[in-house]
């Protein structure tokens, strides 16, 4: 088979280049350094996997905490379409929550709402507008999708642990960049979770 750019012939029995060597060529690194980098990736994977597992539990677990809150103001934000937000002051926490369009239209500043929160990260699972003991409107929390995406990214950091996968290959460039970012972000999340547990901050 002819290499059109170089005009050379590739032999069928030519050995496939080691992925470590490919990255060593790209970044002028010895493949021994890349093995140390792989260890670094594996270390960062542990907090990412822990946070991903906690997020998965938080998404599927029922709400365990309710906070009575008073709506302070409403906001529309036009980022990738129109999104609707409420700012409210609860008995326990301050809230800035994404809500559905219908709920946004029904609720007004000064209304009382009930926000049911997830057990670990205290994210809104549902927001209810009630009057005289009757539910006038209800919406789900807007953070579940973002949390699920972060959890998926966290589980992707498992990739360096699987044997037979060429982690340092061009096909995995996005994951190679993503893994340390997710790992470091997960460490920050765990630190905030500890601060919330000890009462230094009210929510993660």
Image (cartoon, rainbow, N blue to C red):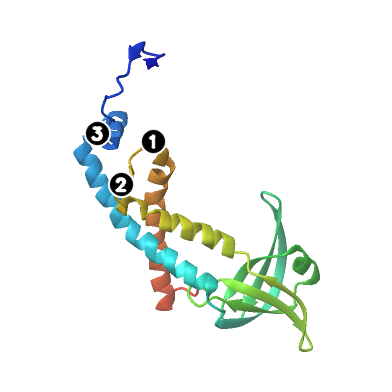
The 10 Å Cα crowd at callout 3, few under 14, some 14 to 19, many 20 or more, is some
Which residue lies most toward the left here? 32
As measured in the structure, the alpha-carbon distance from the residue carrying label 2 to the one carrying label 3 is 22 Å
Say if mark 2 contacts mark 3, CB within 8 Å: no
Q: CA distance from mark 3 to mark 1?
A: 16 Å
Outermost residue on the bottom side: it is: 133
Q: Residues within 10 Å of mark 1 (few under 14, many from 20)?
A: few
In the image, what residue occupies the spot 44% across and 63% down?
52
Q: Secondary structure at mark 3?
A: loop
Which residue is label 2 attached to? Answer: 164
Residue at the farthest front position: 12
Q: Which dot, 2 or 1, sits closer to the camera? A: 2
Q: Nearer the viewer, mark 2 or mark 3?
A: 2
**Which residue lies at the image location 41% right of the left edge and 46% below the top edge?**
175
Identify the image quadrant of the N terminus: top left
Q: Earlier in the sequence, mark 2 or mark 1?
A: 2
Q: Nearer the viewer, residue 192 or 59?
A: 59
The answer to whether residue 151 is seen in the rendering is yes
The residue lying at 76 percent from left, 63 percent from top is 101
Q: Note whether residue 91 is visible.
A: no
Q: Is residue 37 left or right of residue 93?
A: left
Residue 29: mark: 3
**Looking at the image, which is closer to me, 127 or 62?**
62
Q: Residues within 10 Å of mark 2 (few under 14, many from 20)?
A: few
Residue at which label 1 appears: 170
In the rendered structure, the answer to whether residue 124 lies left or right of residue 194 reads: right
Q: Does 161 sit left or right of 61 as displayed? A: left
Under tag 2, what secondary structure?
Answer: loop
């Amino acid at each position: 088979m002819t290499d059109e750019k170089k005009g050379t012939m590739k032999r069928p029995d030519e050995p496939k280049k080691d992925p470590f060597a490919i990255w060593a060529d790209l970044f002028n690194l010895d493949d021994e350094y890349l093995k140390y980098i792989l260890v670094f990736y594996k270390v960062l994977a542990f907090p990412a996997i822990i946070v991903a597992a906690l997020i998965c539990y938080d998404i599927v677990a029922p709400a365990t905490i309710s906070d009575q809150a008073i709506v302070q103001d409403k906001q529309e934000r036009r980022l990738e379409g129109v999104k609707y937000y409420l700012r409210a002051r609860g008995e326990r926490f301050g809230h800035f929550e994404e809500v559905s369009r219908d709920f946004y239209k029904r609720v007004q500043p000064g209304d009382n709402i009930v926000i049911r929160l997830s057990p670990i990260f205290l994210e809104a699972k549902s927001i209810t507008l009630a009057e005289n003991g009757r539910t006038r409107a209800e919406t789900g929390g807007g953070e579940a999708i973002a949390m699920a995406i972060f959890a998926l990214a966290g589980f992707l950091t498992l990739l360096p642990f699987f044997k037979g996968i060429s982690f340092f290959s061009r096909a995995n460039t996005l994951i190679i960049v993503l893994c340390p970012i997710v790992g470091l972000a997960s460490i920050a999340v765990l630190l905030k979770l500890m601060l919330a547990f000890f009462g230094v901050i009210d929510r993660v």
